[in-house]
Image (cartoon, grey):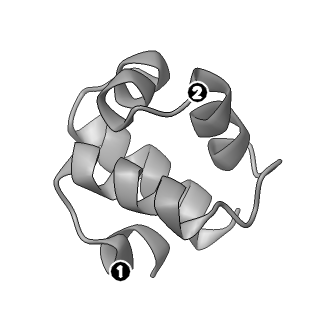
């Protein structure tokens, strides 16, 4: 599993957020979160990563490292 997928799932679960709730908070499609976690989208855009990291209240670095 890629580090982005692993970190996203870990951080989302630590905040007790569903994929759907995180998608709404980040203002991205629910399918985007699902695809990143399932590694069907291994290279999300910086804009998407920024939105997700803001919704999780973490830095983009923490999401991708």
In the rendered view, does 54 fall on the left or right side of 22? Answer: left
Residue 64 horizontal/vertical position (percent): 48, 74
Residue 1 horizontal/vertical position (percent): 70, 62
61 over 53 or under it: above or below: below
Give the numbered dot on residue 29. 2
- How far apart marks 1 and 2 lie (CA) works out to 22 Å
- Residue at left offset 30%, top offset 26%: 17
Give the numbered dot on residue 61. 1
Residue 28 horizontal/vertical position (percent): 50, 34
42 over 34 or under it: above or below: below
In the rendered view, does 17 fall on the left or right side of 43? Answer: left
- Label 1 vs 2, first from the N-terminus: 2
Helix, strand or loop at mark 2: loop
- Where does the C terminus fall, quadrant-wise? bottom left
Helix, strand or loop at mark 1: helix
Question: Which picture quadrant has residue 44?
Answer: bottom right
Q: Residue furthest right?
A: 40
27 over 21 or under it: above or below: below
Which is more foreground, mark 1 or mark 2? 2
Question: Which picture quadrant has residue 7?
Answer: bottom left
């Amino acid at each position: 599993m890629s580090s982005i997928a692993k970190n996203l799932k870990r951080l989302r679960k630590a905040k007790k957020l569903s994929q759907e709730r995180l998608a709404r908070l980040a203002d991205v499609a629910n399918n985007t979160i699902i695809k990143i976690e399932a590694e069907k989208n291994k290279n999300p855009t910086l804009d998407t990563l920024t939105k997700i990291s803001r919704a999780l209240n973490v830095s983009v670095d923490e999401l991708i490292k």
